[in-house]
Image (tube, rainbow, N blue to C red):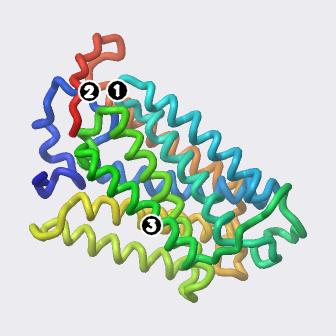
Amino acid sequence: MTLGKSDVLTDLDAASTSTSVMKKLPEVTLAFWIMKIAATTLGETAGDLFAQTMKLGYFLTTIALFSVFVVTLVVQLRSSRYNPFCYWTVILSTSMAGTTMSDFMNRDASAAYLSGGATSLGWGPQGLGLGYPAGAAILISILLAIFLVWRASGMTFQIRDIVTFRGEALFWSAILVSNTLGTSMGDFLSDSSGLGYAGGALLVTGVLAVLAALMKAPAVPNVLLFWIAFVLTRPLGATAGDFLTKPVAKGGLDLGTAGSSAVLLAVLFGLMAHAQVRERRATGSPGAAPEPVTQRAG
């Protein structure tokens, strides 16, 4: 499969997509990345809100948020065409679930991971205590396994051309694992690397800038650049979320998980509404008859 340089990271040649195929996923544009960062930052603050501020704990919160992910994913899979609200709700649910899944894998019940003077969190085990390196290694292995299965299936890696159920299932599996992996990387940068929240965010931003420059390098596949960028926007959101919510003494702004989540939710909702309006303008009036769907394997 040969990919053009604008196949994955931009929508410059979107007009060449066959009109007989009804897209289920968005074009990957600058707006896409802005919404991705907003959703992952909200995922970090909202996950911490439930697990730490509300003291439900990592175990119960992981179960609850993973259930939310399953429900939102079913709605997305049953949708006949791309709907920004459905799509970005799933992205948000993977970000929230990924936050607590990462915390549950990497952390333990020690006071170092408790917030606001809490002495315990929720019911059940509060973490496996694997640590960030071991947790990241496990998640990278799972993500590589998903990509190997994806490649063996013969289905396309081009996001805008994924229209089959199997293709979407593989895509969303990779999204969930990559968001969980990105959370682990963000927490490591913020908590254990010595860079702090701002330093970690600056490092990830610099790497993303390098990836953007590599778009012009013919030897580097855009599919690879997309997934590296997708993983790295998660630690950017994680460090940004920590910067907003953590105490000033730890290098944060101490805005709190509830207030930060409310502001971020309003921002994301506004972006989703704007995307919905643009999608309706691009596809015609909401009541127009849908185009026929031609299923293809890849």
Side (left or right) of 251 relative to 182 = right
- Residue identified by numbered label 1: 81
- Residue identified by numbered label 2: 22
Precedes in sequence: disc 3 or disc 2: 2
Which is more toward the observer, 67 or 238?
67
Farthest bottom residue in view: 194
- Residue identified by numbered label 3: 141
Q: At 30% across and 53% down in the image, what residue appears?
A: 30
Packing grade of label 1 (10 A; few <14, some 14-19, many >=20) is some
Packing grade of label 3 (10 A; few <14, some 14-19, many >=20) is few
The answer for how far apart the CA atoms under marks 3 and 2 are is 33 Å
Q: Are marks 2 and 1 in contact (CB under 8 Å)?
A: yes
Side (left or right) of 167 relative to 197 = left
Residue 287: image location, x then y, percent: 35, 11
Q: Are marks 3 and 2 in contact (CB under 8 Å)?
A: no
Side (left or right) of 119 relative to 110 = right
